[in-house]
Amino acid sequence: MAISLGRVLRAGLIPALLLAGMACKRPETALRERPAQRVELVQKVKGMTPEEERALVARISEGLGLPSVAEVPPGGSTRVLRLTLKGGPDPDATRGLGRTWTVSVGEGFALGAFLASGAPAYTFTSWEVTAIGGGVGALLGAAYGPVRYRENQARMQRFGYLPWEIHAEWEVLDRRPGGGEDVAAHLRPANLDPEPFLHPLPAGARTEADVRAATLEATAEALLRKVKGAPGAVR
């Protein structure tokens, strides 16, 4: 299980994915049709500084081959790639085996009950079915708890830290001169995997700011890889 049950619940991925299914166009498709001319960041990442925001936008803009200042065509609109980031430290970083197991059981119960209740489809089933779903989820969570702990320990050994939990969403806008904008692609979970782009930190450089910076850098690389995977998405 690559993503913990808690991350699914905390990030609100289930409702987001449902909404994503109703959106009219994917950002990749919109960028394939017309490349972005500007990158904007909306962030709610714990402790992220204005300097880090500017550096992240500059890194993504550079990776997409965009100028530091968007060139607005006369009488035309500017295509904007807007990235929304939310997140903070991984709570598992301070949990031992017992606490990790307990949390995994609770998260499994909550997720199982949520799915069994019919809430994802806005159709309530019954309390009995909800309870059964919660019980099944709790059993799965109990089985996964030790696995989750071992996975976390392996990542700690590899990187020296647990990366932050960053939830990314993106949308593509066409901004008209003088104000106003049209939505070319609705807000969607970006479903980024920063793990392949993480790098180890030395023992003396594992502060909260260091780990946040390493995670944001990996997130930017994952986003660039995803955008560049769409033919014609980059100029």
Image (cartoon, rainbow, N blue to C red):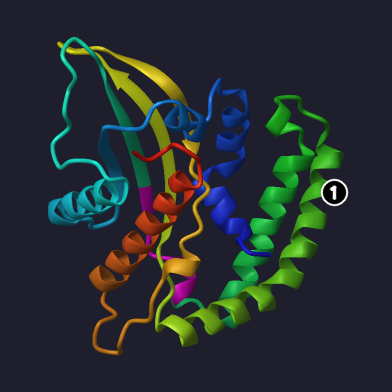
Q: Position of residue 164 (x, y in %)?
A: 40, 64
Q: Quadrant of the N terminus?
A: bottom right
Q: Position of residue 165 (x, y in %)?
A: 44, 59
Give the residue displayed 46% in from the left and 25% down from the top. 186
Give the residue displayed 19% in from the left and 19% down from the top. 73
Q: Quadrant of residue 162?
A: bottom left
Query: Quick check: is 228 in the magenta stretch?
Result: no
Give the residue displayed 45% in from the left and 37% down from the top. 232
Give the residue displayed 76% in from the left and 36% down from the top. 117
Q: Quadrant of residue 107?
A: bottom right
Q: With 157 as the anchor, is 179 left or right in this view?
A: left
Between residue 196 and residue 37, name the one nearer to us: 37
Q: Quadrant of the C terminus?
A: top left
Q: Which residue is mark 1?
A: 132
Against 55, residue 126 (above or below) is: above
Against 56, residue 115 (above or below) is: above
Between residue 78 and residue 33, name the one nearer to us: 33
Between residue 138 and residue 22, name the one nearer to us: 22
Q: Position of residue 43 (x, y in %)?
A: 29, 44
Q: Position of residue 160 (x, y in %)?
A: 40, 84
Q: With 224 as the anchor, is 77 left or right in this view?
A: left
Against 152, residue 228 (above or below) is: above
> Callout 1: 10 Å neighbours few (<14), some, many (20+)?
some
Q: Range of the magenta residues?
A: 86-93
